[in-house]
Image (cartoon, rainbow, N blue to C red):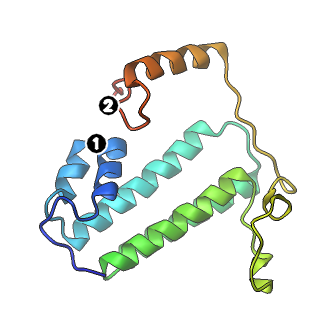
Amino acid sequence: MADIRADLCQYYPMKDVFEAILGTASFRAVKDYGSLKTWKTETVRLLRAIALTIAETVEVADEEWKADVQAEIEFGISIAKSATKIDELFAGLAATLATLVFLQVGFLPRDHYKVKRVALSPRNWKLNSVRSVQYVQSEEQKAMQKKVKKLKGTHPSAPTPPLDV
């Protein structure tokens, strides 16, 4: 992988994520030329924000799931802290986030290594045998969604209402 360059376009999608989620200071830290140390700091901060978001947002979950999520995030943080190259940092982050996605929808399928290739058919990917996920929305949340949608327009990365910081 290429070395980190003084180039706004290099790794721009991740820079954009840092800005959208962590604020402009995070974006500025890596904007034109952020050292590996800076990238590691912002990546750890992102993972900690994800951990906090899950803890504060998921209202009903079993203790094993909570422990699995926390362990995966801690593992991701350890990978980020120990990365010696930017590609190691991004690979660790991608693996951590992919694992979290599967945990968020049910569980991480671990027996797939036993077969040559797992078919992308629904029967192989329905992950509700251990736990199921529900997204519910109160009337207050629906009203907020309408406000946010009106403020954002139709583009998902448009600014959201101001946060209390």
Per the image, the residue denoted by label 1 is: 23
Residue 165's tag is 2
Question: In this image, 153 relative to 99: left or right?
Answer: left
Q: Amino acid at mark 2?
A: Val
Rendered view: 51 above or below 5: above
**Residue 64 rendering spot, x and y as whole percentages:** 75, 58
**Residue 82 rendering spot, x and y as whole percentages:** 38, 79
Name the residue: 33% across, 56% down: 13
Q: Nearer the viewer, residue 41 or 106?
A: 106
Name the residue: 28% across, 55% down: 15
Name the residue: 79% across, 77% down: 111
- Mark 1 burial class by Cα count in 10 Å: few <14, some 14-19, many 20+: few
Of the numbered discs 1 and 2, the one sitting upstream in the chain is 1
Circle 1 — which element?
loop
Q: Amino acid at mark 1?
A: Gly
Quadrant location, the N terminus: bottom left
Question: In this image, 134 relative to 71: left or right?
Answer: right
Question: In this image, 90 relative to 31: left or right?
Answer: right
Residues marked 1 and 2 touching at CB (< 8 Å)? yes
**Residue 28 rendering spot, x and y as whole percentages:** 17, 51
Quadrant location, the C terminus: top left
- The residue mark sitting in front, 1 or 2, is 1
